[in-house]
Image: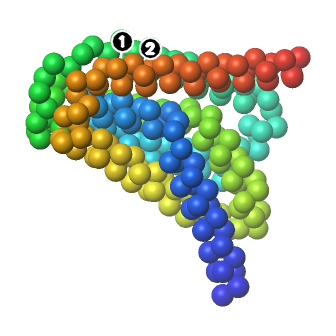
Amino acid sequence: MENLSIYLGEFLTIATLHFLAVASPGPDFAVTTRYSISYGRSVGRWVALGIGTGIFLHVAYSVLGVALVIHRYQWVYGSLLLLGAGYLGWLGWQAIQAKPNTMPVNQTQATGLAKAPQLPASKAFRIGFLTNGLNVKATLFFLALFSTVIAPSTPTMVKVGYGVYMAVATAAWFLLLATLITWPPFLNRLVAISHWIDRAMGVALIGLSLKLIYDWLVLIKIIL
């Protein structure tokens, strides 16, 4: 019973920290918003599922101790910074080239069944997965979580359970975002400026990319 109360306390701390992290604006939020508005609810939901699944990547290397390797070897961390910067920059460049949408929005289009151009579900899922998997913010979050909040004595299966919760909660959060942002009464107000929203999200993603490059340059200066 005492161990159960310890794990319950850990879980509540993790759940609180995770909610604050996932709700804060970042690459996952920007990408879900951009693809939901541009391609419809269905595509946005696939992106959200990809983001949720990407959490398992962070959980896996954290449970296996790879997070400690990332923390110890700065060149590994620097490589992740560059990978994340390149991917976010590519997504941002695509977004700022968005064209005005002149099509009226109806319920069918909002759900992604008739909105053109279409984006394959597999590609939408992959975009979400890579966005989260290469999100250095998530890497730092899980590094801190598994090295400070979660006790070393916590059984591996309990840690995996925490990870499953965070993956499901992340997917649910962004599924909700993709659903609400494509709600027809709300989307009708956005459609006229959707290309500007795309471009703004593109600028935000490129800004995040430049921030990662700056962090990489600072890291290189420290190493040298």
Residue drawn 43% across the image and 25% down it: 201
Q: Is residue 82 above or below residue 97?
A: below
Count residues near mark 1 (Cα–Cα under 10 Å), then give few for <14, some for 14-19, many for 20+. Answer: few
State the SS at label 1. loop
Q: Crowding at label 2, few (<14), some or many (≥20) Cα neighbours within 10 Å?
A: some
Q: Which residue in the rendered view is the most extreme toward the bottom?
A: 1
Label 2 near label 1: C-beta < 8 Å? yes
What residue lies at 24% left-to-right and 16% top-to-bottom? 100
Q: Nearer the viewer, residue 135 or 66?
A: 135
Relative height, residue 5 to residue 44 (above, below): below
Does any portion of residue 81 appear in the rendered image? yes
Quarter of the image for the C terminus: give it: top right
Quadrant for the N terminus in the image: bottom right
Tell me residue 92's x, y (percent).
46, 19
Q: Residue at x 66, y 73 (%)?
A: 9
Q: Name the one closer to the observer, 7 or 27.
A: 27
The answer to whether residue 98 is left or right of residue 23 is: left
Q: How is the image coloured?
A: rainbow
Disc assigned to residue 97: 1
Question: Is residue 73 shown above or below 165?
Answer: above
Percent coordinates x, y for residue 189 in the rendering = 23, 33
Q: Amino acid at mark 1?
A: Gln
The residue labelled by disc 2 is 93
Q: CA distance from mark 1 to mark 2?
A: 7 Å
- The image quadrant that residue 99 belongs to is top left
> In this image, 121 relative to 20: left or right?
left
Judging depth in this view, the residue of 185 and 18 nearest the camera is 185
Q: Secondary structure at mark 2?
A: helix
